[in-house]
Amino acid sequence: MPDRVVVAMSGGVDSSTAAALLVEKGHDVIGIMLRLWSEPDCADADANRCCTPEAVDEARAVAHHLGIPFYLINAERPFRRQVVDDFIAEYGRARTPNPCVVCNRDVRFGYLLDYALALGADKLATGHYARISRTDAGDFRLLRGVDRAKDQSYMLHALDQRQLAHALFPLGGLTKAQVRQLAAERGLRVAARSESQDLCFVADGDYRRFLARHAPGTARPGPIFDRQGRRLGTHQGLAYHTVGQRRGLGIAAPEALYVLEVRPGDNALIVGPASELGRDCLTIAPMHWIEGPPAEPSLRAEVQIRYRARPVCALVEVGAGQAQVRLDAPLRDIAPGQSAVLYQGEHCLGGGPISTPDPI
């Protein structure tokens, strides 16, 4: 009897091609799409961008083309509770959250994985560009996708051993161009479909409007100071600013000013010239080690602080539930709340949110 695999379908070329490849390998494939929470009563959109009526139609058409069953299941409540509420709470703490990391951990490989297992599937496949290998000890290891321009291991770094044991990433060894070619060769109507990069649950893409509506306390004006304590202006809410930001400060100055620090304690922004930007250390807390904490108290690794950021070499000191990272070269935009992910070559060690750094 063929292995049963649930494919998380989105109506896009990646998940559709993943489903097609698994069908060709002889698996018993079931396509499932999640209906996620969207803003009620928003004039700009009536659906989450990941599951618009058009996307549902595309996913259903691909499933029909492949001859596999397709189900649309309601995940609005867990998505709202796990992803959206966390997004709002993090901005309320003047942190910059990464909702895609939370969604992958708690919704796709949480809620949907449990649903797949209940259907008798052993694996949940997605269209992520990442790979999985096994160590000699039998642990599951997360690796970067072959296509570094599309690699999504950063967004998957919070998965644990149980989740990786049930995960399949059929596209991890392919490039995006190859995936589109495979989709076209198989007659998938989504072969040339474009991708959405915006926050899926923010109807018009304007997270500031979203926060003003759903968390009005984040839109609290406060002072803008320089490092010498001189007041230079007034901001309209800490949630509207992040470290390294230049635009939107509303300050006339002889040289460009950037956000150096966000201080929720006194609702203040600290700004300064580019020469004052940059740190050579950060703390990851809580730190999630995919294969468990390393045996040694310190290690060399590369750290990546944004999805598209260039990794930087660093010395990592392993602590209780956290990691202290000393960078070989300073980075300008270390923002509390964003994910810092550790690598050794292609190997993703894990990561976690950047904790609030000490003042410079």
Image (cartoon, rainbow, N blue to C red):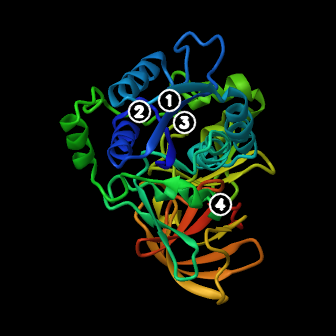
Residue at position x 63%, y 64% in the image: 161
Q: Nearer the viewer, residue 316 or 227?
A: 316
| The residue positioned farthest toward the right in the image shown | 265
Circle nearer the viewer, 3 or 1: 1
Left or right of residue 57: residue 159: right
Residue type, label 1: Cys
Circle nearer the viewer, 2 or 1: 1
Residue type, label 4: Arg
- Give the label on residue 250, or none: 3
Residue type, label 3: Gly
Residue 292 position, x and y percent, is 66, 75
Q: CA distance from mark 2 to mark 1?
A: 8 Å
Q: CA distance from mark 3 to mark 1?
A: 34 Å
Is residue 298 something one can see in this rendering? yes
Q: What element does badge 2 sit on?
A: loop
- Give the label on residue 162, or none: 4
- Give the label on residue 28, or none: none
Q: Which tag, 4 or 1, sits closer to the chain's start?
A: 1
Are dots 4 and 1 in contact, CB under 8 Å?
no
Q: Which tag, 3 or 4, sits closer to the chain's start?
A: 4
Judging by the rendered image, the residue that carries numbered circle 1 is 50
Residue 26 position, x and y percent, is 37, 47
Q: Which tag, 4 or 2, sits closer to the chain's start?
A: 4
Circle nearer the viewer, 4 or 2: 4
| The residue positioned farthest toward the bottom in the image shown | 296
Are dots 2 and 1 in contact, CB under 8 Å?
yes
Q: Which tag, 3 or 2, sits closer to the chain's start?
A: 2
Judging by the rendered image, the residue that carries numbered circle 2 is 196
